[in-house]
Amino acid sequence: MTLAELAPPAGEPLTLAEARAHLRVDDAADDPLIADLITTVREHLERTTGLVLIARAFRLYLDDWPEGRVLEIGRGPVSSVETITGYDALGAPFEADMTGFVLDGRACPARLFLPEAPQTARAINGIEIDFTAGFGMTGAEVPASLKRALLLHLALLHAYRGAVSPGDQPAEVPAGYDRLVAPFRRMRL
């Protein structure tokens, strides 16, 4: 299973103004650094939770459909599934029949049920699923506790900016971060 982001987010969950207000930074000299840190904390949160904060398109590649016909999608929340593509013996793509599909996009992880699993002749990455995931198009639609976690993390990284190189960020997560993110984190048994 391989996941590819088809487009970057149209924006970030935190605005520069929100970040500057939280950091109590008045001048614009640090704006490029703060913008980079906003991206860093978003990417860290998304990587560690499987969440997508700002809506964007993804493609999931599968070798074959799972036996139980319920596919877990490792990113969420999933708002829509656009297409499911398979490949025949000659390598030509075909769209799978999505009649009767059920999407539980808010589940953690999101789940997709297909009454009839698509068959593919390709041994590797024979099924492609294009979907859209994210809380919404703007930071206003991101849950408040996740935005608070991002702001806490941003403040810590901003404080470490001279001690830790940008390539080694995030150096640390702040106290309370895990509690804010915990309700959204995937737990494995």
Image: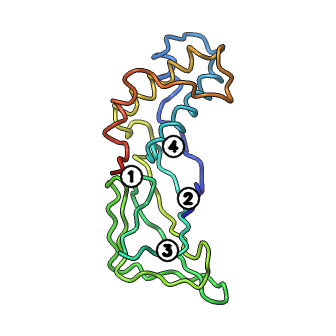
**Mark 3 belongs to which amino acid?**
Ile
* Residue at the image point whose x is 57% and y is 32% from the top: 40
Residue at mark 3 to residue at mark 2: CA–CA distance: 14 Å
Please tell me whether residue 155 is drawn above or below residue 104 in the rendered image: above
What amino acid does circle 1 point to? Answer: Pro
Q: Earlier in the sequence, mark 3 or mark 2?
A: 2
**CB under 8 Å between callouts 3 and 4?**
no
Disc on the earlier residue, 3 or 4: 4
Name the residue carrying label 2. 3
- Which residue is outermost to the front? 189
Element class at badge 3: strand
Camera-nearest label, 3 or 4: 4
Kindly identify the amino acid type of the residue bearing the numbered disc 2.
Answer: Leu
Q: Which residue is mark 1?
A: 77
Residue 84, disc: 3
User: CB of mark 2 within 8 Å of CB of mark 4?
Assistant: no
Would you identify the image quadrant in which residue 137 lies?
A: top left
Q: Which mark is residue 47?
A: 4
Dot in front, 3 or 2: 2
The N terminus is located in which quarter? bottom right
Q: Earlier in the sequence, mark 1 or mark 3?
A: 1
Sequence order check: which comes first, mark 2 or mark 1?
2
